[in-house]
Amino acid sequence: MCGKMISEQKNQSLIEIDGITYAFDSKDCEIFFKKFKSLYGEMFNPI
Amino acid sequence: MTKCIAFHSYKGGTGKTTLACNLAVSLAKKGYRVFLLDLDVSAPSIQAYFEKEPQKWINDFLNDSADISDVAIDMTTLLTESSGTSENKNGRFWVGFCNPKKEEIYKLESGREDNAKMQLLRKFILLRERLISDYDVDYIIIDTSPGIRYWSINALAVADILFLTLKMGELDVDGTKKMADDIYGSLTKYGAKSYLILNRVAGFCMPDSSYAHEHNLIEQEIGFDEKLAKTVGMRIISAIPCYCDIQFSRKEFLTVIKHPTHPFASQINRLAEENEIKV
């Protein structure tokens, strides 16, 4: 979901949200993802 | 650490663009690196404060036809325009303007396929990241469109601090409360902080103090502020009196530059020093 491709594979964190595992390379990206998911619900489909 | 502050309102005409522009300049004058971003996509108006005709716009960056360096207009020289010197010479100030042409507004506002929408959203998040990585900014100040609109919501989602501005006298408390519950609630649960800014509060234009006290005018205002904050569920971070010389000016201007000792400029400078927005 982050604005750019995952830059450092070793720093990425894997977070499971609603049964799907997402990779984030920063805490900011993870928070943005959660905020957009909370705002747009099912309409938000980053994949 | 960068702080991203979004100015938003339920209704138009609350003065959020004036507040955003003046706060951005005030912070830069204090020595911070500040990027002011016009994201009032449907009615861009920041240009009126800076009298600049950019070659490239934020729209071009989002539509992949310009780099961030093309759309970031360096306005640092503005900081020394009033007194000939800035309070702190380390301050830097950039502005990203939004294109007011109807074709460009339509391009960003119109419906797109889901994939294209996600691409645009990624580009918007990348914009924030590039401002932090390439410009090392302390503050990103975003002016948004009023109400619940696609780009306003996106701007609020990438912000750390949300300023909901209300103009006294034309309040829609119920609408504001509903928007605060629906939108702000989704963001504050993930760490965003939200505050109310009351603009054009009676005060500067009040009748002389003996008349105001005799007729209980000041007490009524104070009581109302508290009730409003309780209803909307946000703390009032600033209550800015109405200043007729600013409100009824024929031309927009930056008070913190043009009249740095004006009471409005003092209010803005106080807001810039609030602990809640310190980096």
Image (cartoon, helix red, strand yellow):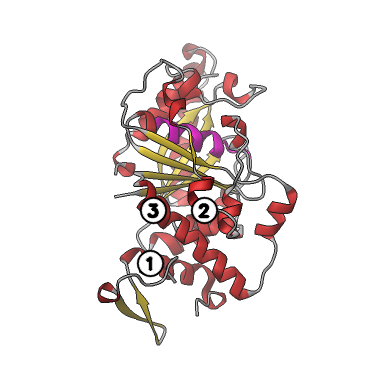
* B273 relative position to B144: left or right: left
Tell me residue B235's x, y (percent).
39, 45
Q: Of the residues under marks 3 and 2, which one precedes in the sequence?
A: 2
- Residue B167 visible from this viewpoint: no
**Mark 1 element type:** helix
**Mark 3 element type:** loop
Mark 3–mark 1 distance (CA, rounded to whole Å)? 13 Å
Tell me residue B256's x, y (percent).
46, 24
In the orientation shown, which residue stands out farthest toward the right? B102
Residue receiving disc 1: A29
- The amino acid marked with disc number 3 is Asp
- Assign the C terminus of chain B to one quadrant of the image: top left
Tell me residue B221's x, y (percent).
49, 31
Tell me residue B116's x, y (percent).
61, 71
Badge nearest the viewer, 3 or 2: 2
Residue receiving disc 2: B67
Which numbered dot is residue B160?
3
